[in-house]
Amino acid sequence: MSMFTGLYPVEHGIVGIGDRKHLPDSIPTVAEIFRRHGYRTVAFTGGVNVAAFFGFDKGFELFRNNGTHLRDNLEELRYWLDEHEEEKFFLFAHGYEPHGPYQSDAIDRSALGQRDAPSTRKLRRSCEGQSKRRHITPFIRAYDAAIHRGDRYVGQLLSHLDKLGLRDKTVVLFLSDHGEEFLEHRGCFHLRTLYREVLEVPFIIAGPRISRRRVDALLPGSVSVGATLLDLAGIDEHELPGPSLAGWIYGDGPRFDKIVSETARPARAPQGAASIHAVSSTTEKLITELDDGSRLYFNLIEDPAKLDRRRSGNAAQALASWLDTWATQHPRKLDTSDSAPLPGDLAEELKHLGYFN
């Protein structure tokens, strides 16, 4: 939702899966703005967490969900491109590769020198308690193979753009909404912490007049997506508040000294439910649980892996004060509508992805 609105979760009000809320009509989305400027707006999604139930269809003239993975939508997506290749379009393609339960095809496992796919029945048990990293090695291999499958289907989409002669006049942004933990900090998966393995994701962009280079600066991801794409399309007048990375794409952009992240840990997590904020710089990091006020401070120069948890000190207090100021500058724009019961099929899909027991 932050990618679509440029707002932080605390601002648009949808922080975790348990919120079960719908984005208010008054909050603009990147799809609405593109549509207002004459673009066709289409989405082919894996549904579930990005279902229309939550308001993700806002601004899209076509919002399709044929299954949870990229390949489930690829045929219809390519057909749509064939029919509209002469028009301007904003297209959102989304799938759950490599989300758990990690799935791959024989061709993916073969490419990585793997044999049969491991069963994932014992994965959650292996990720809890005092498990050793070697216990989850088979699941890490399954994750790698699922990444390979996602890469194959992204490649097929790019090949179709090439076939239609669209790559030279199309901006393509590839990214993920989160990473995955594998016992780096005593647990697995995502939602439960705000460490590097969950927060740092691919952000790869290509298109006209974009030269190949790597940016090693500290940059915000999700909240920058909408504003960046609108800027690259030459749409300067828009309502999205998120920072644009267009300056970095074409040269040097604004410096971001600190990055804020948020999550809502579910009640089924071993540590219990909690609202968590983090502020990160290139040299230090603070993670705070809003419910009980606990803090974890990390010196990233001395401890880049974030294993030495320090709970107090002047540096931690300074970051906590900065985060308090940030929170006052980013108030909730308005309350989202009351939570509604999830449709039965959506609840089942969330269970399949591991969000509900």
Image: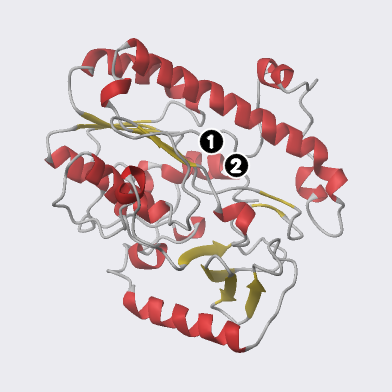
- x and y percentages locating residue 34 in the rendered image: 19, 40
Q: Residue 96 carries which label?
A: 1
**In this rendering, is residue 69 above or below 264?**
above
Q: Residue 228 carries which label?
A: none
| Separation (CA) of disc 1 from disc 2 | 9 Å
Q: Please identify the quarter of the rendering in which residue 282 is found.
A: bottom right
Query: On the picture, is 255 further left or further right than 300?
Result: left
Q: Are marks 1 and 2 in contact (CB under 8 Å)?
A: yes
Mark 2 burial class by Cα count in 10 Å: few <14, some 14-19, many 20+ = some
Q: Is residue 4 visible?
A: no
What SS does tag 2 mark?
A: loop
The residue depicted at 46 percent of the width and 68 percent of the height is: 258
Name the residue nearer the viewer: 111 or 281.
281
Check disc 1 and give the amino acid type. Answer: Tyr
The residue depicted at 12 percent of the width and 39 percent of the height is: 37
What SS does tag 1 mark?
A: loop
- x and y percentages locating residue 164 in the rendered image: 30, 12
Check disc 2 and give the amino acid type. Answer: Leu
The residue depicted at 52 percent of the width and 67 percent of the height is: 281
Q: Is residue 267 visible?
A: yes
Q: Earlier in the sequence, mark 1 or mark 2?
A: 1
Mark 1 burial class by Cα count in 10 Å: few <14, some 14-19, many 20+ = many
Q: Residue 353 carries which label?
A: 2
Query: On the picture, is 59 further left or further right than 44?
Result: left
